[in-house]
Image: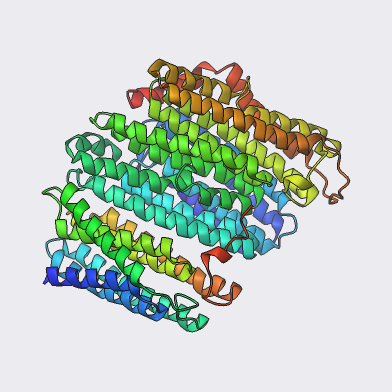
Amino acid sequence: MIFALIILYVITLISISITERFRDYASIIAMQGWILLLIVLFKLQSIHISELIFVLTETLLFKAIIVPAMLFKIIRKTKTNHIYAIGQSQFPSLITSIIALIASIATTYYIADTATNMVFFGVALYALFSGLLLIIRRKRIFSHLVGFLVIENGVFLFSMAIGTEMPFLINIAILLDILLVVLMLGMFLSKIGNSLKSIDVDAETLTTLKN
Amino acid sequence: MLAIYFISSFTIVALLCLAKNRKTIIALSAIFYTFQLYCAGDVALNHIGETQLNFFTFDNLGALCFALLTVVSALTFYHSIRYLDTETPSQFRLYNQLLILLCSAITATYFANNLAVTWILIEATTIFAAGLIYHRRDQKSLEATWKYIFVCSTGIAIAYLGILLMSSAAIDGELSYKALASAIKSGNMLYMKIAFIFILVGYSSKMEIFPLYTVGVDANLVCPTPASALISSGLVNAGFIAIFRVFMLYKETPIFPWISNVLIVAGVASLFIGVLYLRQTNNYKRMLSYSTVENMGIVAIGLGIGGYGVYAAILHIVAHTLIKSGMFFQISQVGKKYGTYRINRINDYLKYCHIGGIAIIAGAIFLLAFPPSGLFVSELMIVRQIVILEKWWLLIVMVLMLCIAMYGVLNQVIKLSYTESKRKTTDYKIDIIGVCLSFALILSACILGIWQPEWFVEFINAILNMYEV
């Protein structure tokens, strides 16, 4: 079951690299949240019940419900739904994403040791690459935000790959990280959206700080 | 003691919510900075070696940086009173609340004895610093805040990956530095290498070194200038401590030379970038920020080469904190007087404030490590260690970069002080006491270059002994 969920997670990562609409971004992030919830449910049965409840609640509330809801709200408020102003082929993005997938598999085989769950490790690495690619390749800052969320989900998956017992401190760390995500989304929603009028904001327009 | 410190800072922040006028805000904030000063003295004299609240240990390095923080933050508060003279009481109140919370988060970072706790506190500093960056509520501050939160968060997420990798070596999930120092030796060395790179990348946004140095530069540019002084000294030191503690975990491992080389590469890249942009910028605040990147590059090189370099790195941190914060305070007066920080619009400052002009020239000279600056001594020690190691390429790169920095900074600062100006200035009356206090900071770094008190040398040596350097 976990393996099937992981395959589904990889598919979401491939599809996020070729999606053309912000609405699809939000749907994929929501789907990743639910997949992570199920993975936690199946994978972390051995940990202490209070910690399991904490991780489950946090994943359900933030990753599966609140963050996607905020993304949809931003899209509704700013009324722009396309990644590019003009239509572009997504083929180069697909190729880059597949190269990232192959690189992740190769890296995992090279570095992962017996104490590490190789499948989780590889997929987490692929999530990290996918997020970074979204930040680097896409111009609009909403895509950067989604890229950050993909990295965050990758980090979450990574924590399960290492096989640590998710000590209390790491749970707190995840919670604080989520607080920052919500802060960023809130800032985007209330300030950047108002100030820059639409989601149609390229990173290149954020240049008032240039010398 | 630490519990009382945190409780008092939160209490004062809460009480500030009730403050309706500037006088009450100033009085309440002054209580905090006075108490903080007392705490710094108490920690250094009576509590070294103690562990409090489970996750905090008072060591010499933390105590040293805490002492510097108390001085810089108190002066930040003092300069902010006049700098933010047009702010409404509510804006002024929020600014002071964030400043106090930032100081508390930085202090906690200095003393954290656990890898995960350090990470959490570093993340907390992002939130409070972001509030200060957004103080002006305009387009520029919004952009800088967005970039700061976004890049810091991405960096911190990457650092978290590093912590997770490092935790694979931890015994029973114990992430205290003490436990990790022995556990790491039996870990997968490839993981440990990657972990260090991830943590270095993540914390580089705080220490303002390559690769994520940019956010610090933008933050300093947009922040109210007195707060920039705190960010480019106190917060930078927090980043330094976080990296230093992780770096020292590897000391007994076979990959320590490799880790040292990574720090040297990061240091050289920071030095190169800092020097390159120092010459190109047309803004004094940006120039000082790039100077921070340059100096932190030197610190990273010092740590990387080891030996005398480690002592030099700590001395460099102390002298840099004093000079850089002093320079930011001086520049805040210049900015208020001219209504801008643009280099091509500020001239003839000596005409308006003789002592301020001299302080800026002296500060620039000391910042460039001319004798008798404390930075001169630290850089000389680093060069000495490089010669001992016979790393000639590093020596050539470092000396070349420092020469370019000297030309760039002096050229700009001499323009500020001497070139005749026909531009109109504002009616702002320069705060001579503030100017003198920040000049005293700059001069104290100069004293460290001439004479280092025995207790000061012993204090730094105790840090080196603790890590058996």
- Left/right of residue B36 with respect to residue B241 in the rendered view: right
- Left/right of residue A47 with respect to residue B415 in the rendered view: left
* Residue B373 shows in the view: yes
- Name the residue at 56% across, 71% down: A191
- Left/right of residue B440 with respect to residue B56 in the rendered view: right
From this view, report whether residue B451 is shown above or below residue B77: above
Please provide percent x and percent y for residue B36: 54, 41
From this view, report whether residue B184 is shown above or below residue A10: above
- Name the residue at 31% across, 76% down: A28
Please provide percent x and percent y for residue B468: 32, 23
What colour scheme has been applied to the protein in the rendered image?
rainbow
Q: Nearer the viewer, residue B151 or B107?
A: B151
From this view, report whether residue B358 is shown above or below residue B28: above
Please provide percent x and percent y for residue A111: 19, 47
The residue positioned farthest toward the right in the image shown: B422
* Residue A62 shows in the view: no
Q: Nearer the viewer, residue B422 or B117?
A: B422
**Quadrant of the image for the N terminus of chain A?**
bottom left
Please provide percent x and percent y for residue B346: 78, 44
Q: How many marks?
A: 0
Q: Nearer the viewer, residue B54 or A86?
A: A86
- Name the residue at 39% across, 74% down: A89
- Name the residue at 38% across, 21% down: B307
Residue B22 lies in quadrant: bottom right
Residue A93 lies in quadrant: bottom left
